[in-house]
Image (tube, grey):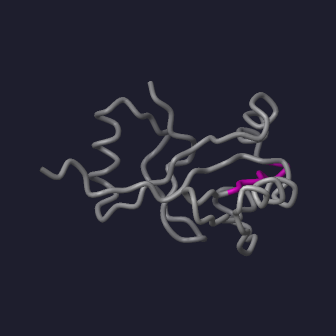
């Protein structure tokens, strides 16, 4: 029986330095892609790929991104979101909400591709 039409795409790490954090992950076999800026997220992002683990998205918030800057100052460089690939974003959003995962808003398209739910996904 198929439970879901989604799969883990990547883990999101909040960082104060994409270059410094990508260097640390390089020692684990990860390679950094191109760093781009996404104005909707108000952050620079860089995907890291590795042979032995999930992809990792580094997210370095802009100086004026108070919510992510606050999270970064309290948690430090750390994982803060999961990204799932799905064929039906609305159904997956409802399925995750039914399993007590919370998001701050409905999914919105990103300049970098895909969707964002404007915040981290946390288990309630």
Closest to the observer: 72 or 117? Answer: 72
Q: Is residue 75 magenta?
A: no
**Is residue 103 or residue 52 the one in the foreground?**
52
Q: Quadrant of residue 46?
A: bottom right
**From what the image shows, is residue 102 above or below residue 44?**
above
Quick check: 61 left or right of 98? right
Question: Which quarter of the rendered picture does the C terminus lie within?
Answer: top left
Q: Residue furthest bottom?
A: 34
Task: Report the residue at 77% width, 61% height from top.
Answer: 26
Q: Residue furthest left?
A: 1
Give the magenta-colored segment's residue range: 58-64
Percent of width and height locating residue 98: 28, 34
Residue 51 spot, x, y in % from top left: 59, 65
In this view, the residue farthest toward the top is 124
Measuring from the top left, give residue 57's x and y in whole percent: 64, 58
Query: Residue at point 20% right, 48% down?
Result: 3
Q: Position of residue 50 (x, y in %)?
A: 62, 64
Please check the rendered image and state whether residue 61 is part of the magenta-colored stretch, yes or no.
yes
Name the residue: 29% across, 61% down: 88
Residue at x 61%, y 50% (from the top left corner): 12
Q: How many numbered dots are placed on residues in this image?
A: 0
């Amino acid at each position: 029986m198929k439970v879901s039409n989604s799969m883990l795409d990547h883990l999101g790490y909040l960082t104060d330095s994409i270059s410094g954090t990508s260097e640390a992950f390089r020692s684990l076999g990860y390679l950094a892609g191109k760093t781009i800026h996404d104005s909707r997220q108000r952050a620079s992002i860089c995907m890291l790929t590795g042979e032995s683990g999930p992809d990792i998205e580094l997210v370095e918030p802009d100086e004026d991104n108070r919510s992510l800057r606050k999270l970064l100052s309290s948690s430090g460089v750390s994982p803060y979101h999961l990204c799932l690939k799905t064929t039906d974003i609305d159904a997956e959003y409802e399925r995750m909400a039914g399993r007590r995962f919370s998001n701050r808003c409905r999914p919105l398209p990103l300049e970098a591709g895909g969707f964002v739910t404007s915040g981290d996904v946390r288990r309630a």
